[in-house]
Amino acid sequence: MPNRLAQETSPYLRQHAENPVDWYPWGDEAFTRARAEDKAVLLSVGYSACHWCHVMAHESFEHPETAEVMNSLFVNIKVDREERPDVDDIYMNAVQAMTGHGGWPMTVFLLPDGRPFWGGTYFPREPRYGMPSFMQVLHAIHDAYANRRAEVEQAASSLTHALDNSLLDVGTSADDLNTALLDRAASKLLSGFDRINGGFGGAPKFPQPMNLAFLLAHHARTGDADALNAVTHTLRKMARGGMYDQIGGGFARYSVDEKWLVPHFEKMLYDNAQLSRLYLHAWQVTGDRFFRVIAEETYDYILREMTAPEGGFYSATDADSEGEEGKFFVWTIAEVESLLSADDARVAVTYFGMTESGNFEGKNILNIPREPADVAAELGLSVDDLAAAVERITHTLYAARSHRVHPGLDDKILTAWNGLMLGSLAEAARVLNRDDYRIAAIRAGEFLTSTMVEHTADGPRLLRTYNHGRAKLNGVLEDYACLAEGLLDLYMTTFDTTAFDLARALTDRALTHFRAGDGGFFDVSDDHEPLIVRPRSLQDNAVPSGSGKLCRVLALMSAYTGDARDDDAARAALRLLVSGMSEYPQAFGESLGAVELLAGGVIELALVGPLDSPALRDLAAEAWSAYRPNLIAAYAPQDAPPDHSIPLLAGRVQRDGQPTAYVCRKFTCKLPVTEPAALRAQLDSAG
């Protein structure tokens, strides 16, 4: 008989609906029962694409004897960390404080009031790997709770006090948010760059898109060739490795080796949202078509496989299918030869580095280990003929792969992750002039604004997650920040002021309800449900820090509105992080990007004229033709009144009846222009 999780919208929670464990979702019902029965709470946190979460579920949560002990001794709560990043953050900090490390699945034992007193990550069903069995842990924790309550209470009090204090200890600095800070941070980041394989550090390797984006912006400001090389070399190595799906497009979450060859095969929306944008920007900077192709293949993958009928974007696909990690993605030479002509099979084996013994458990993860020109020469083909053959091969293999059992799909729609994807797709639409991307971005924006926004007397309130027709859970800071940024990008693509107005309202609400007394930001609003502490995540993880992202949005919004409040708020929050950004820049890429905007100044572009005018379209196309990370744009279809709702447009008029562009930066405006070449010159000199 299904347990309570059968009623949840999270695929991860529903995966546990048939467990014999008497699971509760996070909420008052579970804690009320724990208090009534004086039982400790067992909190298990994971996510649908987590391999070891599946292992522990199979070993323990599906095991009747283990479930019987769990049900007898504890009140059991299961949480999807992607739905509840606030809960995950609090208790992950607790586990890290207790054990020195963290990860998922996370297993934490709580008092009935929610305070943690012991925790860990994965526990095996039988003792191994130097760890006790999960059953041993259950009995030991119950014994401590039942017979040494005073010690348990003291441990919980001390740990909760430490968590509360750590959230307040963000530091202060008199240092200004200047280019010297940015140059120091870039230098420190580059000192850890792997000049052979790309990326930073050793295995396992994560893409770190926030840090790469910061380095690309640093190059745009300084011309630092080393920063540009770090970005382009990393992007090239990732896209030619097994990290990238050579057949279907899109990136896996991370590589288990330093060469980007063997991925952990799960694909996450947040990675592909950020990486697609990075490859788009790399193409703008270098003109190298390779980067554009990878960007477009990634966008096409998202539209083809990760877009819901409603218009939003799904969260992830699993690493496993048929119980085997990576089975969906790997190939043998015999399989390839059975599907392709002899000539194309020879190309595939050579181009994708295939061997009879394989590079992953006897099979081949497709990658591109050699330069295409060298492969073409070996095969006696021109580079163009090789490219045509590879295109035929990938189409054939994709069609064949589509008949395999697919990895599980996490089809929940998360506001923050969708905001990231919306912004990336909207920018790609205007940069590449792709109508399909524009239509998809508009549909996503319409879905998010109609479904994930509750309109209240206090302004728009965001919901966190949607699935099966239900949107629920309070939005957290990253939801407000990422969606506001995505809406600003949508506005710059469509010039629909509805998107701008909502972005502004979301920013206002974030300032009102998430701000801390020291000028920083909490992860949850002041009217959020009570938690043992109010979480505050200032560093980037796989997704950008909500605080750093909001500071970036505030810098952009201040340029649109001229409101010093937004600029002041961004600076106040970022000044708290100066020490961290200087010493540990790898954890603060998003915040460093916000400092770039503030230190370098936003370039403001106002366009005036009929939107269907070819001359207006030419001016807009010129604006987006180059990588300008600090450029914003606003649009008025006709001469704008002095009290225009977007102050950047106030008083802007067409010159001599022609569509006209105005460029401003740091309180200084250039003469209005009507020709794309003149606009280019002004933008280049302003940047």
Image: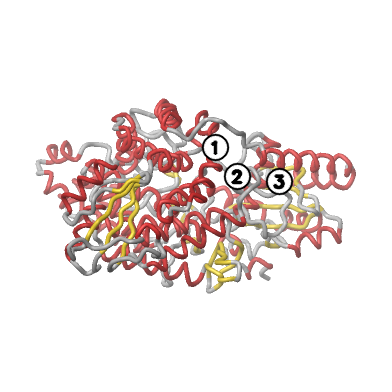
Q: How many marks?
A: 3
Q: Nearer the viewer, residue 315 or 216?
A: 216
User: Could you tell me the amino acid type at mark 1?
Assistant: Arg
Instruction: State the residue at coordinates (51%, 64%).
Output: 412
The numbered dot on residue 519 is 2
Residues marked 3 and 2 touching at CB (< 8 Å): no
Upstream in sequence: badge 3 or badge 2:
3
Residue 192 in view (yes/no): no
At mark 2, the secondary structure is: loop
Instruction: Identify the mark at residue 575; answer none if there is no mark.
Output: 1
Residue placed under numbered mark 3 in the picture: 134
Q: Few, some or many C-alpha atoms within 10 Å of disc 3 (few <14, some 14-19, many ≥20)?
A: many
| Label whose residue precedes the other's in the sequence (3 or 1) | 3
C-alpha gap between disc 3 and disc 1 = 44 Å
- Is 276 on the left-hand or right-hand side of 49? left
The crowd level at tag 1 (other Cα within 10 Å; few <14, some 14-19, many 20+) is many
* Quarter the N terminus occupies: bottom right
